Image (cartoon, rainbow, N blue to C red):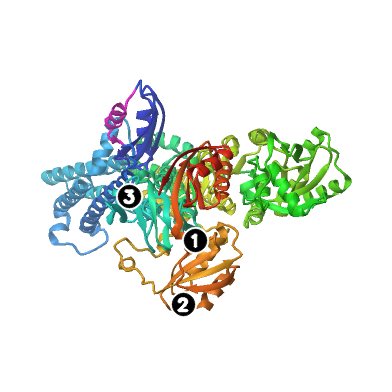
Amino acid sequence: MKESFNVYGMTCAACQANVTKAVAKLDGVKDVDVSLLGNSMKVDYDEQKVDAKTICDAVDRIGYTAEQKQAPKSETNSLKKEWADRQARVERDRKAAWDRLISSVILMIPLMYVAMGEMLHLPLPAILSGEQNHLINALTQLILAAIIMVIQKHFYIDGFKGLLKRAPNMDSLVALGSGASFVYALAMTYIMAYGYGHGQMTLVHHAAHSLYFDSAAMIVTLVSIGKYLESKSKAKTGDALSKLMDLTPKNAIVIRDGQEVQVAQDQVRVGDIVVMKPGQRVPVDGTVLEGTGYLDQSAITGESIPVEKTAGDEVLSATINENGTFRFKAEKVGDDTTLSQIIRLVDEAGTSKAPIARTADKVAAVFVPIVIGLALATFAGWMIVGGDFRTALNNAISVLVISCPCALGLATPMAIMVGTEKAAQFGILLKNAESLENLHNIQTIVLDKTGTITSGKPSVQDVVNFTDQSDADFLELAAAIEQGSNHPLAEAITAAANGDLAQADAFENISGKGVKAVIGQKTYYAGNRKLMDQVGIAIPEKAETALNDLAEQGKTPMLFADEKQVLGIIAVADTVRQTSAAAIAAFRQQGIHTVMLTGDNAKTARAMADRVGIDEVISDVLPADKEAKIRSLQEKGQFTAMVGDGINDAPALVRADIGIAIGQGTDIAMDSADVVLMKNDLTDVNTAIDLSRAVIRNVHQNLFWALIYNVIGIPLAMGVLTPLTGWTLSPMYGAAAMSLSSIIVCTNAWRLRFFQSKYASTGSKQEAKPSDHKQSEVSSPAVKEEPVVKEKLLLDVQGMMCNHCVASVTYALRHVKGVIDADVKLDPHSALVSTDGTVTHAALEQAVENAGYQVVSITSDQPVKKEDTRMKKQMDVDGMMCEHCQAHVTKALSDVPGVSDVQVSLEKKNATFNAEDSVTDEMLKKAVTDAGYQPGNIRNC
């Protein structure tokens, strides 16, 4: 069982090590991960042997406080509340530290003046100067130092508590050093009083120059300055999380009792109907029911180009509705929203422990006891070699206060946290700190072709027809043969065919080779060369030539044959993503070997690889063999990454040293990956690798500084130069150096905030910064007044072939000045445009033409006639397993006369569509049944 805990009272790496040790030794605890930055702890334990209370008690016993975190609740924003509580505690602690610091500095000024004034020949009141007033001077220093030490009492309470519980930490070093200085000075004060009482002025003079009250107070003051500045640097590492939190709108409009009601965002519940207006930020995840909106999703994906959302489309929390009005059904609220999951992932990854931190943690765990031992050895050594007590004590105290376990403990987690948050700004989500570290180790990167290098949407490129039929008729025959297949290439062919397809019987899928179907009592085959060889059909020379030519062009040729001969070839190709070639070239610059994994034949695969610059090709790979190919690369000693997006990529993603799921991939692929890219851009992998290298470089710098500081500083404090130069290190300078070392580490890690990607993708921003976007809350005056529609125009638009065309025309029309709304339909090819009365016909025509389409006519005040006779319906559909099933159901329903605007949800197992009055439920159910799926209830929306 894995549980998370809040841990309070940790101030340094030694504290972290103490908590880890205390919990790890409990019987039943399997693993412990303590975060100093996050003040948190994750424990994997056997609940049969140990429970959460026992774990908390173990932490409490060594002087810290632990409490179990509450599990997130889907209906509430517990994550946001947890973050708010954490920030409130941080702010409360920061304010208290600031108050202590200011008070100490104010008192240190007169203390240092009194202590150093006579030596520096500064004017002092008569009552504090001269041999006769040494005791009064000493008592004044004592009072001022004691007040400062009371103000900074937490150092002594926590430090001595750690010593008593045999879990010493940095506070223990400070408490010992400062306390020893104070006790020694107090002893000198008594000696001074004794000297005055017995007339021994030599003794008084010696004691007056051996006071350490200023050192005792200055040590804790300087350390508190360092700790305060360190806390400020730590707080800045949470800025990215704070910005993510701020993306959640305060309010939302929902439908309650048939009325629009404004409610707090955390009051939105699953099933609520949410109303979205222009300028508003989406409060929760859901599915659009009606209307159209254009959403800026840059806060989630980094893509700044607005995406059209219509009925059936998914909307994500934190995205901005730039234009349009729509309603959607809330499906994921509270801690279940996409934004909440991203926040939790960033938070957990930032506070998790990277492998590189383990060595530093081991050193930090024994660092404080070693330093205490060195301080004792220093004192004893100077006393043995004949040094005076004052010198021995001075050097021992210097050793205690100059030693800094904090710098060592902060070296890795500070850089990891900043790097993780920076990655999130680029739309790169890391599952844990180990993922961030592993990215810099990549030697070989394996890229799945379809959906990763290419867009995953193949289309027919060439038709080579050896029959007497027209090319169109041959394409229809090929589509009829392939219509029973759910392979992407088959779907591309069926999508390209026009007209009604012949009924295919006895359909058979021949794995890895092709398909077989019977049409009109005649058997047909469609597939690759292996299929033709299997069924004994010879491939003529002209077909061989065509196959080679098409393959060399990077296309996938498919052979079609009857029982006797090859009838023709259809070549299908997938569109290469715009950034793929640039990303692969960048991999080469990064020194990474690229491998493409594909089921295509060797010639086609090599042509595609040459086109984008891939180093190595592994072709003819069956889906089940991908994992084995990754394993074989690893066996050659290569640290291997896998980039994929599909269900069949999941085993390979798990097998790889680091799995990377590209945006809009399946949930299974994303769950299997170590890194998730929020957008479909391969250059984000380059960015992730560069960021990882920057983080690891930063960690090495921090570790080097932390180690070299202690290696040089501790011997100097021990007095190794004293015999040669007579110079000794003052404890005050040691305390200042300790504070400075932590500040340097924090500041160096903070530099990662300025990391910039060299790979800015087309149409997207390098970083998704909330402040870049204008937004309005529900209560904003900008969304209270709806524009007045003064004219409606009906446009006859030609050239639209699919929903992407509809989206393009809609976007073009809605961006014409004066257009309030545009409702574009594919059937009939029309656009109903609502305007404020100032829009000219020429402006509308120009906008549509610029989008690549043609306006045939514009009619004033004409409604879309078919709209009145249509009813929005929803049908449950069982049996759908993947996106290909989704496409089959969509096509089956779209082919029913009178049915339009079909939207099929794979997740909800239903289909939403508009149907004419003439369409019966029996017609709809028959269409779904004929497609091979089970129709369920049909209802009006």
The outermost residue toward the left is 197
Label 2 secondary element: loop
Disc 3 is placed on an element classified as: helix
Q: Residue at x 84, y 47 (%)?
A: 543
**Residues packed near mark 1 inside 10 Å, few (<14), some (14 to 19) or many (20 plus):** some
- Residue 360 x, y percent position in the rendering: 46, 39
Question: What amino acid is labelled 1 in the image?
Answer: Ser
Report whether 370 appears left or right of 528: left
Residue farthest along the front direction in this orientation: 918
Q: Position of residue 517 (x, y in %)?
A: 71, 37
Q: Which residue is mark 3?
A: 227
Secondary structure beneath dot 1 equals: loop
Whether residue 757 appears in magenta in the rendering, the answer is: no
* Measured Cα–Cα span from mark 1 to mark 2: 28 Å
**Residue neighbourhood size for the residue with mark 2, other residues' Cα within 10 Å, grouped as few (<14), some (14–19), many (≥20):** some
**Image mark for residue 304:** 1
Q: Nearer the viewer, residue 893 or 554?
A: 893
Residue 597 in view of the camera: no
Pinpoint residue 154: horizontal percent, then vertical percent.
Answer: 24, 43
On screen, residue 163 versus residue 194, left or right, reads right
Identify the residue position indicated by label 2 in the image.
Answer: 839
59 magenta-colored: yes
Residue stretch in magenta: 50-68
Residue type at mark 2 is Val
Quadrant that contains the N terminus: top left
Q: Are marks 3 and 1 in contact (CB under 8 Å)?
A: no
Q: Nearer the viewer, residue 315 or 620?
A: 315
Indicate which disc, 2 or 3, sits on the residue closer to the N terminus.
3
